[in-house]
Amino acid sequence: MPDQETFALIQATTGNDRRGDSTRRFSSGSTARSCGAQTVPVPGSALRGGFSDTVLRIVAVAELADAVGLVLPAATGVLPWLTPLAGVGLALTMVLAIVYHVGRREWPNIGLNLFLGALALFISYGRFVVEPF
């Protein structure tokens, strides 16, 4: 039998009482607040930032393609002109990430995005100007 603290946590997250009766679930936040219930976020929703799974997958594939495009063409010598283009693409992705993080006031992430964007632009500059293919 769970203790009172565990039972309160289960009840707050699911809206169920001990008998498994789900009649105490609330349909609106105002009703829940007036009855003293707490709003419990869906796990992982804060990390998603309100984006759908499709958008997150597109961003992930774009970042992965940019990262592979920075390293692989120059390392193998196959289509080396893709390296500076991948650098520009990754820098653009970092600019968009900065815009997103400014809106959410996530200041430490902006520093990381600035660093990664500058690094990508450095590689692009080196491949476009210093040692072009």
Image (cartoon, rainbow, N blue to C red):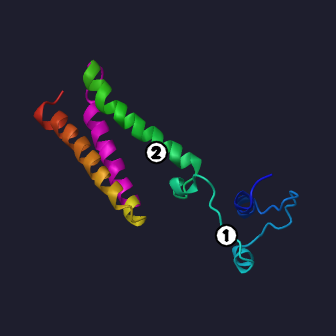
Question: For the point 28% across and 19% down, which residue is it?
Answer: 76
Image height check: is 89 above or below 16?
Answer: above
Look at label 2 and name its amino acid.
Val
Question: For the point 31% across and 51% down, which residue is it?
Answer: 113
Query: At numbered mark 1, what does the secondary structure look like: helix, strand or loop?
Result: loop
- Rounded to the nearest angstrom, the CA distance separating label 1 from label 2 is 33 Å
Q: Is 92 in front, or is 109?
A: 109
Q: Is 132 in front, or is 112?
A: 112
Residue 71, position as x, y percentages in the image: 29, 28
Residue bearing mark 2? 59
Q: How many marks?
A: 2
Image height check: is 124 above or below 10?
Answer: above
Magenta segment, principal secondary structure? Answer: helix
Question: For the point 30% across and 50% down, which residue is it?
Answer: 112
Few, some or many C-alpha atoms within 10 Å of disc 1 (few <14, some 14-19, many ≥20)? few
Q: Which mark is residue 104?
A: none
Which quadrant holds residue 128? top left
Residue 4, position as x, y percentages in the image: 74, 61
Residue 20, position as x, y percentages in the image: 86, 57
Image height check: is 67 above or below 1?
Answer: above
Assess whether residue 88 is covered by the magenta stretch: yes
Assess whether residue 4 is covered by the magenta stretch: no
Which quadrant holds residue 103? bottom left
Q: Is 3 in front, or is 11?
A: 3
Number of the front mark, 1 or 2:
1
Look at label 1 and name its amino acid.
Gln
Residue bearing mark 1? 38
Specify start and end residues of the magenta stretch as a single range. 77-100
The answer to whether residue 2 is left or right of residue 99 is right
Question: For the point 32% across and 25% down, which residue is it?
Answer: 72
Residue 131, position as x, y percentages in the image: 13, 30
